[in-house]
Image (cartoon, helix red, strand yellow):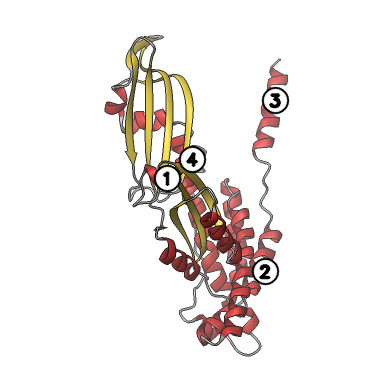
Amino acid sequence: MLRKTALILFFILVSLSAFAFEQADFTNCLGDYAESISQAAYLASERAGSAEKQAFESAADRADKAEKRIRDIISNIETPQDFESAQNTLATFATGSDLNAHTVATVEKLLHQRAGFVSGSAAAAPEINLSYSGRAAEKPELLMNKRQRRLVMIEIPIVEAVISFTDTDKNRRIDNIKNIFSRHSCRILSENSVKNDAQTQVYYFSGRKFVVDAILGQFGGDLVQNDMKAVVRITSGGFWSGKKSVDFNISPNANNGVMGELSWYKSVIEKDPTRYLAENNYKELATLGTIETIAGEKKLQLKNATAEIWVMSKNGSQRNAVYFNKAELGDVYVDAR
């Protein structure tokens, strides 16, 4: 029996750690990333006519795709061993040239963000430290000569934003914004439809800064910089006692760099809302339940509990939340205070 249990645990652990960091693949991605935006610094500094602008946009599109490949690899890194391998790969790549060092300076920011996210999760690897190997050029265009114009790397600013607007049943504005997103390679990160007096459509998306600025100028909205907020509504009660709800407002703080991200609200708040609220808003949560003694320990019982979560931009409201979810929690018990 013990042997069978051990085998089951082994296969579970293997399945949970299927990702294996490949240094060679990561190095190839770094090289592609540098080359894919080869002409961007030159064309951006020239501010020339429509042909150069078109070439710049083409180079930026290739850079977006290359960056996505790197982000996909980094987003799967969780163990200290994989973080160490990624750091070593970046350090080795940075020694190749000023261009490589400039590229690494950008990619290390992504690795640092991932380290902060993993450190703030329940499965955090202890003491994840990054030693910076990159060296950002103050004037990337000075790296160029005629031979090297295809090897110049600049950081193309990618930003995130939230827009919302009302539409008719013809969905013309929705079709229009989707065409804009497709034409300018914007990525939809989350979308939500809110039924009120009219249909409100909300998009949380990312794209090149000059594109996002133009979209915000037309539709209004907010830039997102790890500053999203949320409203969590917990409802509890039974048929005889009646149901009662309390809304909890959650906003990011300076002590948690990833707290204002949509992924944080999904992985921490949405995954176990009563646990977070019991740790941070116990007094208000306690008004929804009763104290019970279970196995000699006092517990706060929330009967037939449900949780609703609205995530919105810093200036948003529940009427234009970019993400909404409702979950039936059943009877919930948390440690009483």
Dot 4 crowding, Cα within 10 Å, few <14, some 14–19, many 20+ = some
Q: Is residue 204 above or below residue 152?
A: above
- The kind of residue tagged 2 is Asp
Label 1 to label 3, Cα distance in Å? 42 Å
Question: Mark 1 highlights which residue?
Answer: 321
Q: Position of residue 154 (x, y in %)?
A: 54, 75
Whether tag 4 and tag 1 are in contact, CB under 8 A, the answer is no
User: Does the rendering let one see residue 300?
Assistant: yes
> What is the number of the mark on residue 8?
3
Image mark for residue 32: 2
Badge 3 density bin: few <14, some 14–19, many ≥20, Cα 10 Å: few
Q: Amino acid at mark 1?
A: Ala
Distance (Cα) linking label 3 and label 4? 29 Å
Residue 91 placement: quadrant: bottom right
User: Which residue occupies 38% across, 24% down?
Assistant: 235
Amino acid type of disc 4?
Lys
Quadrant where the C terminus is found in the figure? top left
Mark closer to the observer (1, 2): 1
Q: Are marks 1 and 2 in contact (CB under 8 Å)?
A: no
Q: Single out the mark in the foreground, 3 or 4.
A: 4
How many other residues sit within 10 Å of disc 2, few (<14), some (14-19) or many (≥20)?
some
The residue positioned 27% from the left and 27% from the top of the image is 283
Between 141 and 239, the one lying in front of the other is 239
- Residue tagged 4: 266
